[in-house]
């Protein structure tokens, strides 16, 4: 059964990250007195950001009574502010090599292309506007973690994209991402292909234990797999 929809992650998969998301997480936590090393934050890349903040707090705050909804919301708002400031002003913001060409090739072949992300929509739109992706018409659908009840690894975002694309069978869907939670999201959705890329937070060796259908170093290889 041919693939009719390919769902791509954003930071680390189609957009160059340069570890800025991890750095921004670290800065947001520091504003509230928490000093979290990168190696603790990195495994949570790809998660809905509020969920990631909550889980990290439970690792670092011994007094669970301090982990309130207000604290989580404050850290998240700080993260969003810092992330938007960065993406609005960064001199260096670009798509990863071959990303735009890959998305356009799939669209030309009649495959629907979607972007999904653990970012909230306000952050995602800043990136899309800076890269002029709407003007370039590189994707058909966009969904963000704040637009569904459950973020990754729950398949809610992919399920919603399937509805928008008029696709009922996940065997007609491929998921592409750079993190463990991307892989698990695709697997939980039942996607035909769950393709991991090594351009983001996880190395080839770190991706292997999660058993994606494919691990690739160049996003252009999605074309060979899908078409």
Image: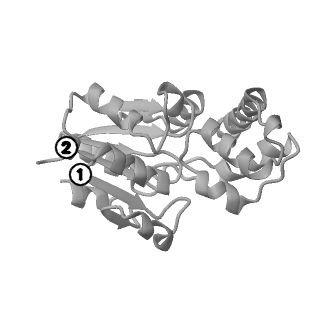
Q: Residue furthest left?
A: 1
- Horizontally, residue 85 falls left or right of residue 9, namely right
Crowding at label 2, few (<14), some or many (≥20) Cα neighbours within 10 Å? many
The CA distance from mark 2 to mark 1 is: 6 Å
Crowding at label 1, few (<14), some or many (≥20) Cα neighbours within 10 Å? many
How are the residues colored? one colour
Checking the image for residue 33, the label placed there is none
Of 18 and 4, which appears nearest the observer?
4
Q: Residue furthest bottom?
A: 205
Residue 50 location (% of width, % of height): 63, 36
- Horizontally, residue 227 falls left or right of residue 190, namely left
Q: Is residue 225 above or below residue 58?
A: below
Residue at image coords 19%, 43%: 172
Which secondary structure lies at badge 2? helix
Badge 2 vs badge 1, beta-carbon distance below 8 Å: yes
Residue at image coords 21%, 32%: 167
Q: Kindly tell me whether residue 39 is visible in this rendering.
A: yes
Residue 92 location (% of width, % of height): 63, 49
Residue 151 location (% of width, % of height): 50, 37
Of 100 and 203, which appears nearest the observer?
203
Q: Kindly tell me whether residue 179 is visible in this rendering.
A: no
Q: Earlier in the sequence, mark 2 or mark 1?
A: 2
Which residue in the structure is indicated by mark 1?
192
Residue 201 location (% of width, % of height): 56, 59
Checking the image for residue 172, the label placed there is 2
């Amino acid at each position: 059964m041919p693939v009719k929809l390919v769902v791509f992650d954003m930071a680390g998969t189609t957009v160059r990250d340069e570890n800025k998301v991890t750095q921004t997480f670290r800065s947001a936590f520091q504003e509230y007195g928490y000093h979290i090393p990168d190696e603790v934050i990195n495994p949570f890349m790809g998660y809905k950001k509020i969920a990631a903040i909550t889980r990290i707090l439970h690792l670092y705050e011994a007094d669970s009574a301090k982990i309130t909804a207000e604290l989580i919301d404050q850290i998240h708002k700080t993260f969003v502010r810092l992330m938007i400031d960065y993406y609005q002003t960064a001199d260096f913001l670009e798509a990863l090599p071959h990303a735009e060409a890959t998305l356009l090739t799939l669209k030309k072949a009649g495959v629907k292309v979607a972007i999904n992300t653990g970012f909230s929509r306000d952050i995602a739109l800043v990136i899309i506007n800076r890269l002029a992706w709407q003007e370039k018409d590189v994707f058909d659908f966009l969904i963000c973690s704040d637009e569904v009840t459950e973020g990754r690894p729950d398949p809610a975002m992919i399920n919603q994209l399937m509805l928008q694309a008029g696709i009922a069978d996940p065997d007609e869907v491929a998921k592409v991402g750079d993190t463990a939670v991307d892989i698990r999201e695709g697997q939980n959705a039942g996607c035909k292909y769950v393709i991991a890329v090594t351009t983001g937070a996880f190395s080839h060796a770190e991706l292997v234990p999660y058993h994606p259908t494919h691990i690739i170093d160049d996003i252009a290889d999605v074309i060979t797999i899908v078409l």
